[in-house]
Image: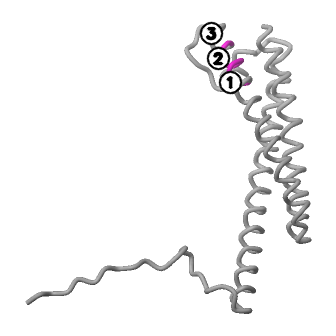
Amino acid sequence: MESLKHLVEVLKSQLSLYSEIKENIELEKQAIVSWSVGKTAELTKIKEELLRREKIQVEARNLLISQIAKEAGKESLSIAGVIDYAKGTPQAAQLETLCQRLVALITQIQAENLSLRVLYATNSRMINDFLTQIGLSEPSYGSASPRKTSTISKVG
């Protein structure tokens, strides 16, 4: 049952990390709205490091879940399967609560990230429109450049 204890610790760590990611996204949104390029770049670097750490934690969680599956005599288990397997242990309630909190937090992050992408797209359009208005850029309509077509002449 040591694997269950370790899984609880990894999930707690993930919860903390996802809270940091959410906070970073919120700060990045504020930096974009205030057109703070330096702050946006700084927050983007921080976010990259947070995502690197997240990848490591996901790998640790998946390894522990694989170990728990072996302990349970299964080829594999989902997190819901781990929670079922843990019933009757001191970690069961913790696992369930942590998973619910993680799902809620990840859902919030997805919504914040979508909002962030909309802000980036809006700012990009505004910059393109401005550059077009002052004559420094051609209007773009979604493609990088017009396609050239070949001309074939009929010899007849």
- Asked where in the image residue 60 lies, by quadrant, the reply is top right
Query: Where is mark 2, residue-wise?
Result: 66
- Front residue (pair 114, 120): 120
Task: Assign the N terminus to one quadrant of the image.
Answer: top right
Kindly indicate whether the residue at mark 3 contacts the one at mark 2 (C-beta within 8 angstroms): yes
What whole-number distance in Å separates the C-alpha atoms at marks 3 and 1? Answer: 12 Å
What whole-number distance in Å separates the C-alpha atoms at marks 2 and 3? Answer: 6 Å
Q: Residues within 10 Å of mark 1 (few under 14, many from 20)?
A: some
Q: Residues within 10 Å of mark 2 (few under 14, many from 20)?
A: some
The image shows residue 58 at horizontal and vertical percentages of: 72, 30
The image shows residue 3 at horizontal and vertical percentages of: 76, 12
Residue drawn at x 91%, y 71% as measured from the top left? 34
**Residue flagged by tag 2: what amino acid is it?**
Ser
Residue drawn at x 69%, y 87% as measured from the top left? 136
Residue 62 is tagged as 1
The image shows residue 57 at horizontal and vertical percentages of: 77, 29
**Residue flagged by tag 1: what amino acid is it?**
Asn
- Front residue (pair 11, 48): 48
Q: Look at the numbered disc 1 and give the secondary structure of its residue.
A: helix
Q: Look at the numbered disc 2 and give the secondary structure of its residue.
A: helix
Range covered by the magenta-colored residues:
61-67
- Front residue (pair 4, 37): 37
Nearer the observer: mark 3 or 1; the answer is: 1
What whole-number distance in Å separates the C-alpha atoms at marks 2 and 1? Answer: 6 Å
Kindly indicate whether the residue at mark 1 contacts the one at mark 2 (C-beta within 8 angstroms): yes
Residue 48 colored magenta?
A: no
Residue 65 colored magenta?
A: yes
On the picture, is 156 further left or further right than 40?
left
Q: Residues within 10 Å of mark 3 (few under 14, many from 20)?
A: few
Residue drawn at x 84%, y 46% as measured from the top left? 21
Query: Where is mark 3, residue-wise?
Result: 70
